[in-house]
Image (cartoon, rainbow, N blue to C red):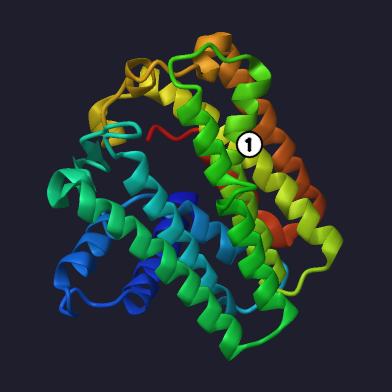
Amino acid sequence: MEIKEEMQQRIAKIEQALQSYLPKQEAFPPVIFEAMRYSLFAGGKRLRPILVLAACEAVGGQENEAMPFACALEMIHTYSLIHDDLPAMDNDDYRRGRLTSHKVYGEDMAILAGDGLLHHAMETMAAACYANPSQKSTGAMLAIARGAGINGMLTGQVVDVYMEGKPLDAQTLEFIHLHKTAAMIRGALEAGATVGGADAETIQKFGLAGEKIGMAFQILDDILDVTGTEEELGKPIHSDEKNEKTTYVTLYGITQSKEIAARLTEEACQIWDEMGESCRFLHALTAYLLQRTY
C-alpha cells in the first residue's frame, strides 16, 4: 500500500475516535465545545496520533489501549496551535486554510478553547489509566505530559517568544526546536511504545528516533515558510520573517538546511532499520515527511 493511502486510512480511524472523545457542541455552554471542535476538526496531518498508534503497533501492543493517548496528544497539539496563533504570540489569521480560532470566536474564547482541549486531554488519559491501571498506561501519560510541559513544548515556546526579534545562535535555535517541536514527537513515540509494552531500551530508541524526526520536521517547516505557497500550507507564508524569528534558513540557508533535515531523517530511518520489519510503516512515514510540501 502507498504511504499516502495508508496514512489516510489511519487518519480516518483517528478522526472517528476523536469524535467519540470530545463532548458534543450541544452541551452547555455550546460556544466552548463549538470552539474546541472548530480547531480540532480543522484538518491537519494527525502526525502525532499516527505516531502513537504506529509505535504501539510496532512493539506488538493493542491499538484500543493506545487510542486514548493518541487522541489526547492531538488535543494538546491543537491547543498549542490555538494559543500560538493568538495576537500575543504569532498573531496569525489563518491556519489550515481557514480563519484561526481567535478570529472566529475572539481572543477570550480562543484561550478558553485551548485550555479546554488541554484539560480534556488530561481527563482522557486519566480515564484510560483509571480503566486500565498499569505502568504501561501511566507511563504513556507521563511521556506525553513530559513532551508537552515545562520540560518540552512549553519551554520551547517560552524561549521562542522571549527571543523574538533578537539574534539567535545555533545552540539556542536547536534548543527551541528540540523543545517546541521535537519533544512532542518524541513523546508520541515513547507513549506508543510504552503503552504497547516495550522494554526501557526499546522505548529509548523510539524516543531518539522521535527527536530526530521532530528536528527534521521543524527545519522543513522553516524551509516551507520561505519556499511554500499560502495555498499549500493553508496559512500565511514568511511569518517567521514577519515576526523577526531566526530559523535554520536564516542561519544556514535553504541548501544546508535541507541537508541537515535529510541527515536527521536518515539517522531516524537507521533506527527503524535496526528495529526490524515491525517498524516498516514508521520508516516509510519518516522518509515521506522529508518530501512534504505542507
> Vertical placement of 96 versus 246: above or below?
below
Q: Is residue 121 visible?
A: yes
Give x and y (percent) for residue 54.
59, 62
* Residue density around tag 1, few if under 14, some if 14–19, many if 20 or more, within 10 Å: many
Please tell me which residue lies in front, 238 or 30.
30
Which residue sits at x=37%, y=77%?
A: 21
The image shows residue 115 at horizontal and vertical percentages of 36, 59
Residue 284 seen anywhere in this rendered image of the structure:
no
Residue at 45%, 58% in the rendered image: 76
At horizontal 51% and vertical 83% (from top left) the residue drawn is: 127
Q: Quadrant of the C terminus?
A: top left
| 16 displayed left or right of 144 | left
Q: Position of residue 124 (x, y in %)?
A: 47, 76
On screen, residue 186 above or below 175: below
- Identify the residue at the far bottom of this view: 131
- The relative height of residue 87 versus residue 259 in the rendered view (above or below) is below
Return the residue at label 1: 178
Which of the 4 image quarters holds residue 143? bottom right
Please identify the residue farthest to the right as the structure is shown. Answer: 201
Horizontal placement of 158 versus 263: left or right?
A: left
Q: Position of residue 145 (x, y in %)?
A: 59, 60
Q: Quadrant of residue 142?
A: bottom right
Number of numbered labels in the structure image? 1
Kind of residue at disc 1: Leu
Residue positioned 34% across, 79% down in the render: 20
Assign a secondary structure to mark 1.
helix
